[in-house]
Amino acid sequence: MEDGTKIRHVPDPDNPGWHTWNLADNTRFNAQTMGHMLVRKDSDTLCRVRMFPERRHTNLLDMVHGAITLALMDVALFASMRILLGGDAGGSVTLDLSSQFIGAGRPGVPLDALVEVMRETKRLVFLRGTVVQGENDEHLVASFSGIVRKPSGK
């Protein structure tokens, strides 16, 4: 468990090399909307956050709904901050999330957010990333950048 037992972050037995990134309270948004999520550190500077899009995540075109992709981006900011910097993901807030949709996500194929930290200050973390699908990340779904404010320490 992480961040005061709010996040279940343990090795995932079904996915070697991955850890879970799920809220302990499964009645909240992440569990209810996103489903089972995974995270891993691809390098010292790159974090990968994965979700498994299903039919319930699709729009009328049978592609991953843009709101789901945006939610993955937002969750990935916090997971990446925690994994790469050791920051308090549960006590931080999104200040800005800018996105560019490039292609449509497909259900039934893992959807990954690849995130890197650009800069960290005393109060803020600046991140950027891409959302991809495919064996070799060959299908680019979106790019994004975000700013996260660290907890105030009150």
Image (spheres, grey):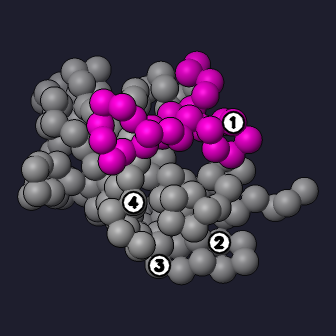
Asked which secondary structure carries label 3, the reply is strand
**Counting other residues with Cα less than 10 Å from the Cα at mark 4, is it few (<14), some (14-19), or many (20 or more)?**
some
Q: Residue drawn 44% across and 52% down?
A: 76
Residue denoted by label 4: 41
Asked which secondary structure carries label 1, the reply is loop
The answer to the question of whether label 1 and label 4 lie on touching residues, with beta carbons closer than 8 A, is no
Between marks 1 and 2, how big is the CA–CA gap?
23 Å
Q: Residue drawn 17% across and 49% down?
A: 133
Residue 21 colored in magenta in the image? yes
Between marks 2 and 3, how big is the CA–CA gap?
11 Å
Residue denoted by label 2: 124
Kindly report the secondary structure that dominates the magenta region of the rendered protein. loop
Q: Position of residue 116 (x, y in %)?
A: 41, 70
User: Could you tell me the amino acid type at mark 3?
Assistant: Met
- The quarter of the displayed image where residue 100 is located: bottom left
Q: Residue drawn 41% across and 73% down?
A: 45
The answer to the question of whether label 2 and label 3 lie on touching residues, with beta carbons closer than 8 A, is no
